[in-house]
Amino acid sequence: MITTVTMNAALDKAYFMNHVIENGTVMRVQECRTTAGGKGLNVARAASICGADVQATGLVGGFNGQYLESLLDKDEIPHQFGHVKGETRSCINILDEGYGSTEYLEPGFEVAPEEEQDFMKKFPEIIRDSAVVTISGSIPRGLKKDIYGRMITIAKAMGKTVLLDSSGDTLKNGITAGPNLVKPNQDEIEQLFDTKITSLKEVIACAKKIHEMGVDNVVISLGKDGALLVCEEGVFKGKPPKVEAVNAVGCGDSMLGAFAVAFERGYTAGRALKYAISVATANAVSPNTGKFEYEQCEDLFDRVSIEKL
């Protein structure tokens, strides 16, 4: 089984507009879609579509938290969340022809020290039956910045494979605990090493530095050009076939979910990268974030090219 951790979950509301937006007026929404949001929950949906047994965990609170759990029930994603006194945040994405996508992200609740302690006490039991644990996204206010590192240490001591997708201090602290995979993008690498990257060669050099810090697999997304994987077997570059992308949101989360499935199934490095790119590409051609047709992944898999650099 795969457990996905989302400490800063949200109700994601997409507002679809069919007319010009006029500031300072009352605007009517053509259509509204609400989903259980947060990077880890996108990972859970992707891994589930790929055929894995999945459960979600993290923190939720209030009526919004109950609603979020009900949406996961509808998606048939089992969950074991820690519950806090605050209210789970909402994130609003306004989509219109004039401006494209405009997001409003609420700050969310603040976690009390005793709420953090209670969740961490339960964490080993939550992940007990999982072979793979993924940890994604930001953390809410009140949590200590080393929480991901502590989770990784606990999970690895229990023999779990741990994948981390975060940024800033939580990424830096997480790396010191030696997760089995991290998936930073170029901006996050630049922040991590306080440098400006201008070439693929520099991206690979930074990825190798992270690998030398004790991370078995370092994955760097290259957008439409695919992804890099730096691991013990060497440096691999995977490139997807040319497709008409519809929705790039959630592609990175879908990729992480696919890597979790690949590790659970014992894929080789090259096959894992190929599989992850095919799943991320299937997400890109789907209008629904984190929801795609698995048959499309199988078709795309044969068209993804893998090169060892």
Image (tube, rainbow, N blue to C red):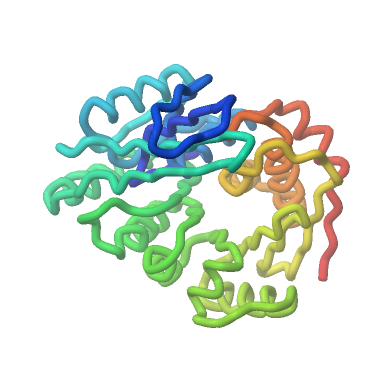
Residue 243 % position (x, y): 82, 41
Question: Can the viewer see residue 129?
Answer: no
Residue 168 % position (x, y): 42, 67
Residue 155 % position (x, y): 39, 53
Q: Looking at the picture, does residue 102 appear above or below residue 33?
A: below
Residue 121 % position (x, y): 21, 47
| Quadrant in the picture for residue 216 | bottom right
Q: Is residue 88 left or right of residue 102?
A: left
Q: Looking at the picture, does residue 126 appear above or below residue 295?
A: below
| Quadrant in the picture for residue 297 | top right
Q: Is residue 283 left or right of residue 160?
A: right
Judge by depth and name the residue closer to the eye, 9 or 1: 9
Q: Which residue is the extreme one toward the bottom?
A: 195
Judge by depth and name the residue closer to the eye, 40 or 67: 67
| Quadrant in the picture for residue 8 | top left
- At horizontal 71% and vertical 63% (from top left) the residue drawn is 228
Q: Is residue 64 left or right of residue 247?
A: left
Judge by depth and name the residue closer to the eye, 197 or 177: 197
